[in-house]
Amino acid sequence: MTDADAKKRTKRRASDDYPTPQPVIDAFLDCVDWFRVRSFLEPAAGAGAILEAARARMTHPAAVTRAVELRHGGPGWLHGDYLAYHVGVDLQRPELISGPTCRPFDLAITNPPFNLASQFLEKMLREAVTVALLLRASWPAGPRAASLRLTPPTHAYYLESRPAFVATCQRKTCDASAALGTKECPECGGKMRDTTDMHEYAWFAWDRGRVMNTRAPFNWI
């Protein structure tokens, strides 16, 4: 295969900033029994798409939503590197979300920075009862298999179609990417197109709080 035949690759985005497409978020959040969720954490919230979709679904009268984010920010969020914080929730004083005396969140969901996924999972399992991460479908294999045997996921929700996370420039000499829906390249002015990822993806869940609405371990969404 020549270089011209190979699939063009784009530059990796800073901080692994690949926002989760809304249909991917909605398909998974619809699998949660939200009345059982009183507190929710999104530890890499970015622009807040997962957090806001979760907030809209929470029905428990004592519900509390919080985010610890790595990049952008928003009102009421704790800003900073999630891996540097100890976070939890106090339902009596919901403004407190940091400190060793706080209780775990009922549910934590995120699309983690790919290179930090293992660290995110380890910390989230300490700070939330039920945890779910969007990962490449092949992620549990290889060097992670040994540690995952100790804490295997209870559920896998495979995406039936490969998602598009970014728009990419269609010029062969440009490796730029931008947010979904971008029509003009911010670097060269060329045409942009939403580009399907090269990998299959799945939501992996560790449902220790039994908030998922199915007991089936393998699911397709």
Image (spheres, rainbow, N blue to C red):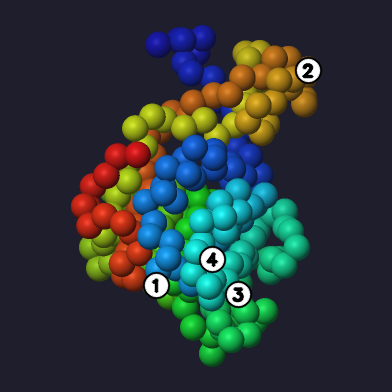
Horizontally, residue 61 falls left or right of residue 93, namely: left
Mark 2 and mark 1 in contact? Answer it, CB < 8 Å: no
Question: Any mark on residue 62, and which?
Answer: none
Q: Amino acid at mark 1?
A: Val
Q: Quadrant of residue 211?
A: bottom left
Up-down: is 17 above or below 200? below
Question: Toward which corner of the image does residue 42 lie, by quadrant?
Answer: bottom right
Earlier-in-chain disc, 4 versus 3:
4
Name the amino acid type tagged 4. Answer: Leu
Q: Which residue is mark 3?
A: 85
Query: Which residue is disc 4 drawn over?
Result: 41
The mark that comes first in sequence, 2 or 1, is 1
Instruction: Say which amino acid is labelled 3.
Output: Tyr
Q: Earlier in the sequence, mark 3 or mark 1?
A: 3
Mark 2 highlights which residue? 189
Crowding near the residue tagged with mark 2, few <14, some 14–19, many ≥20 C-alpha atoms within 10 Å:
few
Q: Is residue 117 left or right of residue 11?
A: left
Where disc 3 sits, the SS reads loop
Question: In terms of secondary structure, where does tag 4 sit?
Answer: strand
